[in-house]
Amino acid sequence: MLNCKEVTELCSQELERPLGLGERMSLGAHLMMCTGCTNFRKQMTSLRLVARTYAEGGAGLPPPGDASSN
Amino acid sequence: MRDLAVEQMPARRDAAAAATGAGTGVSAQALVGLQKDMLRFAQMQLRNRETAEDMVQEAIEASLRNAKSFAGNSSLRTWVFAILRNRIVDHLRQAGRTVPMSSLVEDGEDWQERLESIFNERGGWRDCARPTAWPDPEESMQNKQFWAVFEACLDHLPANTGRVFMMREFLGLEAAEICAQLAISTTNCHVILHRARLKLRACLGNGWAHLGDATC
């Protein structure tokens, strides 16, 4: 049975590599019972979205129709 | 902040203006407007002002040269940042093996303990650190203050950890390539990325519209 710390490791690693079947099952079983880790996993997805958006220049927030956008 | 690139290259600007023609949307003036943000982005990853300035300058020159290939499907900003990211990737690939990463492990040692204090001795969340739901990131990302917090949090990552994180998430390099470039093991790479994410989420949590998980 994975503890929360190990689950956070898997939640991080699934952003790098496909998890194995055993890992996915252990992860799923833990997430069903643990809202903390479920939130953590969503946060990881958000973090990736935020980072990617930032790297695309998103922090500059050009609103639609802004002079610098086209 | 010292202006560079386009403003220092009037001759190039004229040449580029002639080359771009009307209607491409890629103008020296528009690029100057992006320069400051580009420089900040590059500097964060390269940790070297001069190299960052070089990358930005090259990206701006490349943008002007290739203005015709700007389709206007994305914003100019997005397009130019993609060019800048490619420049940084090229630079890292060339420089990668010459940069010592021997201090990577030390990078983690002193703050690892603090990071792990969010877990109890059985590896469960301490009550004060249990993640709560974040608000919709799409909404948060419309907020300038949010980005200021995000940048501050990135700045607070130990240098090498931040570097690995940004190679992965900003430049989109695969973990395998990062490991190879920095001559670190896959396991080490995963550990570094995990720590970076733990740290960033804790930091963002504290600043992200008060949704934060309390610090223990």
Image: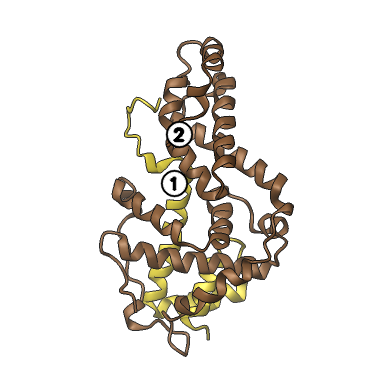
Q: Position of residue B30 (x, y in %)?
A: 42, 24
Which chain is the one coloured yellow? A
Residue matched to label 2: B2
- Palette colour of chain B: brown
B183 in relation to B138, above or below: below
Q: Position of residue B126 (x, y in %)?
A: 37, 83
Q: Give the mark toward the camera: 1 or 2.
A: 2
Q: Residue at x 35, y 39 (%)?
A: A61
Tell me the element at label 1. helix
Tell me which amino acid carries mark 2: Arg
Q: Residue at x 45, y 67 (%)?
A: B199
Identify the colour scheme used.
by chain
Q: Taking A68 as reference, is A52 left or right?
A: right
Q: Position of residue B77 (x, y in %)?
A: 45, 33
- Looking at the image, the residue that sits furthest to the bottom is B121
Q: Residue at x 45, y 29 (%)?
A: B76
The answer to whether residue B64 shows anywhere in this view is: yes
Which numbered circle lies on residue B163? none
